[in-house]
């Protein structure tokens, strides 16, 4: 699927610089001059963080209908090998064409390394010799470990685009996050950066998750699958069970990932960690048959950058 890389964008500052470099009349003895203070060259930026799930797709429809004032939707793709393949397919086949038809920019962003290559979350997890576990892996007591995935692969990636397009502490961008009323506990500004102002338009409109499905369908679009990395440890057992049933190859990959992480930890004399909160390997926790342990977990990604 198309993925416009952040490094490929030409911010207004860069265009200005390029123009100056090609001036036909260079001065021989340029007088020393004060560097002008950097001023934002853009007007206020309004962008919506697009996760490809129900809430942000409903926001896209509302923007197309003129009910939300956002012309740019930013999809921080954590990796074609990491996102739910169903989400990537949905964006390619439905959300992208819908946005184009309605004059809305749905931009794909990736995490770009200094050497210009793209880093993916799955790639970082599987990197030979890697010691860090950037995802909310479950410790033996079931609690999620500290994660950096959302910050590194979503918040910073979107932030970099915003700053390249003029956002700054004196010209903060307005960033819409798709949290619906029934998930209001996820609406917090703990991770707000100085160059952005977070808003929750669906909360302002009193929209619930079920309303999102209705809004999406009213625009003639199918309802998208749940958006999250296919290996996300925040997933509920029902979702793991569906993965095992519907996509056994991917379930096997998840078991392999868990196993790889624990092999590394064994060499470091560290306790095992898991993709579920049940202190046991995924293949044992998620049965092939219907019986499942009672799952009262309500842990999920706070902040609204994932699962929206
Ligand atoms: S979906 Fe889960 S694993 Fe993926 S970036 Fe969000 S919190 Fe991390």
Image (cartoon, rainbow, N blue to C red):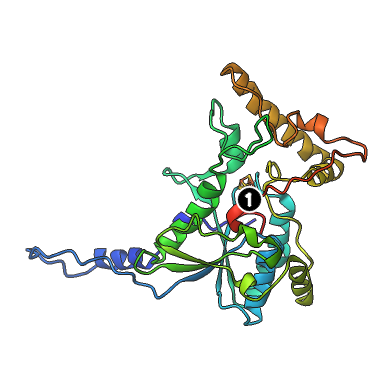
Closest to the observer: 54 or 181?
Answer: 181
Q: Quadrant of residue 128?
A: top right
**In the image, 186: left or right of 226?**
left
The total number of labels drawn is: 1
- Name the quadrant containing residue 142: top right
Q: Residues within 10 Å of mark 1 (few under 14, many from 20)?
A: some
Q: Position of residue 11 (x, y in %)?
A: 39, 64
Residue 112 in view here: yes
Q: Position of residue 162 (x, y in %)?
A: 45, 63
- State the residue in front, 8 or 159: 159
Residue at coordinates 62% horizontally, 57% vertically from top-left? 186
Q: Residue at position x 50%, y 55% from top?
A: 190
Q: Is mark 1 within 8 Å of ligand 1?
A: yes
Relative depth, front residue between 13 and 20: 13
Question: Which quadrant of the figure contains the C terminus?
Answer: bottom right
Q: Compared to 242, does 280 lie above or below?
A: above
Name the residue rendered at 42%, 74% in the picture: 44
Q: Which residue is mark 1?
A: 301
The N terminus lies in quadrant = bottom right
As drawn, 251 above or below 151: above
Residue 109 is left or right of residue 142, and the answer is: left
Question: From this viewpoint, which residue is outermost toward the bottom?
Answer: 66
| Residue 61 image point, x, y percent | 68, 74
Residue 282 in percent (x, y) is at 77, 32
Q: Secondary structure at mark 1?
A: loop
Residue 10 can be seen, yes or no? no
**Corner quadrant of residue 71:** bottom right
């Amino acid at each position: 699927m198309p993925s416009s890389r952040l490094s490929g964008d030409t911010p207004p500052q860069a265009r200005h610089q390029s123009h100056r470099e090609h001036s036909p009349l260079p001065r021989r003895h340029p007088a020393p001059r004060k560097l002008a203070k950097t001023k934002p060259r853009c007007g206020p930026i309004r962008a919506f963080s697009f996760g490809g799930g129900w809430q942000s797709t409903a926001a896209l429809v509302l923007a197309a209908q003129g009910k939300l004032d956002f012309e740019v939707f930013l999809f921080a793709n954590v990796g074609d090998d990491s996102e739910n393949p169903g989400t990537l397919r949905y964006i390619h086949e439905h959300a992208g064409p819908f946005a184009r038809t309605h004059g809305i920019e749905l931009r794909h962003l990736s995490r770009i390394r200094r050497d210009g290559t793209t880093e993916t979350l799955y790639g970082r997890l599987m990197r030979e010799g890697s010691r860090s576990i950037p995802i909310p892996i479950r410790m033996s007591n079931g609690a999620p470990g500290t994660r950096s995935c959302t910050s590194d692969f979503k918040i910073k990636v979107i932030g970099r685009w915003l700053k390249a397009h003029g956002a700054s502490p004196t010209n903060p961008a307005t960033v819409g996050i798709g949290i619906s009323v029934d998930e209001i506990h996820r609406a917090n500004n703990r991770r707000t950066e100085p160059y952005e102002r977070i808003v929750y338009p669906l909360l302002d409109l009193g929209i619930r998750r079920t309303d999102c499905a209705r809004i999406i369908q009213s625009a003639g679009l199918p309802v998208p699958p749940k958006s999250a990395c296919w290996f996300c440890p925040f997933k509920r057992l029902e979702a793991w069970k569906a993965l095992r049933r519907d996509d056994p190859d991917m379930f096997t990959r998840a078991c392999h990932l868990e196993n790889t992480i624990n092999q590394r930890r064994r060499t470091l004399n560290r306790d095992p960690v898991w993709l579920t909160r049940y202190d046991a390997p995924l293949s044992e926790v998620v049965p092939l048959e219907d019986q499942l342990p009672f799952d009262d977990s309500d842990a999920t990604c706070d902040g609204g950058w994932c699962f929206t």
